[in-house]
Image (tube, rainbow, N blue to C red):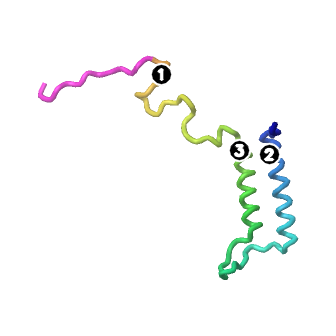
Amino acid sequence: MAEVTTREQRLEDLTKDLAQMRKEWEAAGSPLLIRTASLDMRPHPLVKMIRECEEMIERMSRPVEAARGGRPKGASSAPDRVPSSSAPPKRTQLKAVGE
């Protein structure tokens, strides 16, 4: 059976990973760019990994409710729309043209 990790444990693991990546990046001389085989300049892989890890930590640090977009569950999107548990909306009779 797989071990279940909590959100806090995953966040702690990410924080440790980030610290390790920063140590390795600093030990490599803190390079920002690398030259590829085609002579293009690209961000150093550790810079990219550090950035992605920081973004993940920031996302996981948010409250769960804040991570979900849109209206809260059950919220009406317009005044004439009501939850199904309420009374049906009031209907108005339309008049024919020329009356």
Query: Dot 3 lies on which element?
Result: loop
Query: Dot 2 lies on which element?
Result: helix
Q: With respect to residue 61, does 26 lie above or below?
A: below
The residue pinned by badge 3 equals: 62
Q: Residue at x 70, y 40 (%)?
A: 63
* Amino acid identity at mark 3: Arg
Query: With 67 as the anchor, is 18 left or right in this view?
Result: right
Q: Give whichever of discs 1 and 2 has the lower sequence position.
A: 2
Counting other residues with Cα less than 10 Å from the Cα at mark 2, is it few (<14), some (14-19), or many (20 or more)? few
Query: With 67 as the anchor, is 96 left or right in this view?
Result: left
Q: How far apart are marks 3 and 1 (CA)?
A: 32 Å
Question: In front of the other: label 3 or label 1?
Answer: 1
| Highlighted range, magenta | 87-99
Res. 35 image quadrant: bottom right
Res. 16 image quadrant: bottom right
The residue pinned by badge 2 equals: 10
Res. 33 image quadrant: bottom right
The residue pinned by badge 1 equals: 84
**Residue 45 colored magenta?**
no
Give the image location of residue 44, x and y in percent: 74, 71
Q: Which residue is drawn at 50% across and 19% down?
A: 85
* Amino acid identity at mark 1: Ser
Which residue is most to the top? 87
Give the image location of residue 32, x and y in percent: 74, 73
Q: Distance between the residues labelled 1 and 2?
A: 39 Å
**Residue 92 colored magenta?**
yes
Query: Dot 1 lies on which element?
Result: loop
Image quadrant occupied by the N terminus: top right
Q: Give whichever of discs 3 and 1 has the lower sequence position.
A: 3
